[in-house]
Amino acid sequence: MEANSKWQVSGGVAERYEENLVPVIFIPWAQELLNRAELIVGEAVLDAACGTGIVARLASDRVGPDAKVVGADINAGMLNVAKSKSEEEGKLIDWVEADVGDLPFGDASFDAVFCQQGLQFFPDKLSALKEFRRVLSLDGRCVICVAQSLEHNPLMNGQIEILTRYIGEDAANAIRAVCSLSDSSMIHDLFAQAGFSKIDIESVTLTLRHSDGKAFVAGTMSSTPAADAISILPEETRQELLQEFLNTFGSYYDGHALAFPHVSHVVHARV
Ligand SMILES: C[S@@+](CC[C@H](N)C(=O)[O-])C[C@H]1O[C@@H](n2cnc3c(N)ncnc32)[C@H](O)[C@@H]1O
């Protein structure tokens, strides 16, 4: 439960997260965050709770090859995938194993700090935001996104229903944690308490798409912290679970492709 609520994965799950979830979910959100930060060439960027590092990798294209770009995460498996992907893409990015509550960087060492779908998993959210503010320069900005509640997010809602039914409450907890920080006034208070000013919180809905619904549900279920529990189910039960998961999308599935809403708060705050 403790590891699950921090979205901890092991084995080959980090590779599958990169392969299955990043193109459909995390690239579109990363572009949203990067557009709002208005990065300029040469700016220093931190991707906090970077996972496989998609925000850092895309930020690197915007700030150029000579700028400092760093990704930090507590999960070594996620960082290994981040490192091999950035090497493959020919990008110079530093990958650092660190807890967001105690970042190993000097004061005012970044122009922008991003945190994509990470804040909801931190046990001490205020300490993390204070750290983000500490490492930002005087004109620095922090841009993050956090998923809204389950009723707005059919993907997570369906996953929870199916994991609870086929595996148990505990297996659904990592997904429940994704939507656990949906109150925008609470998010605003946390940023204000951490000392940020000009805190803008916007509700953003993206339509996420996959041309093969069956492949997407199989890929998604194999890329979360519940993947191991699913992989040991008898094959027939696993196939039934995947079909039932696909059914939860209702009219968002047309028999071939999926197109479903994914709703988050996007926060843009200044030091
Ligand atoms: C849903 S993933 C999002 C990853 C990434 N930001 C992306 O857009 O793909 C959440 C990440 O938060 C990381 N995480 C959770 N708690 C953390 C902490 N206290 N410090 C650093 N990283 C943390 C997890 O290891 C995981 O990689």
Image (tube, rainbow, N blue to C red):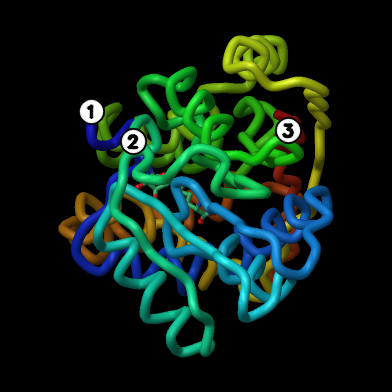
Residue 231 visible here: yes
Residue at x 47%, y 54% (from the top left corner): 50
Closer-to-camera residue (65/118): 65
Element under disc 3: strand
Q: Tell me if 33 is positioned left or right of 182 in this view.
A: right
Residue labelled 2 has its Cβ within 8 Å of some atom of ligand 1: yes
Q: Amino acid at mark 1?
A: Glu
Q: Position of residue 12 (x, y in %)?
A: 25, 69
Is residue 150 rendered to the left or right of residue 98? right
Image spot of residue 213 (x, y percent): 61, 67
Disc 3 and disc 2 in contact, CB within 8 angstroms:
no
Nearer to the camera, 193 or 15 = 193
Asked whether 32 or 257 is in front, the reply is: 32
**Mark seen at residue 6:** 2
* Residue 182 location (% of width, % of height): 63, 22
Q: Quadrant of the C terminus?
A: top right
Q: Residue 267 shows which numbered tag?
A: 3
Q: Which residue type carries mark 3?
A: Val
Q: Quadrant of residue 54?
A: bottom right
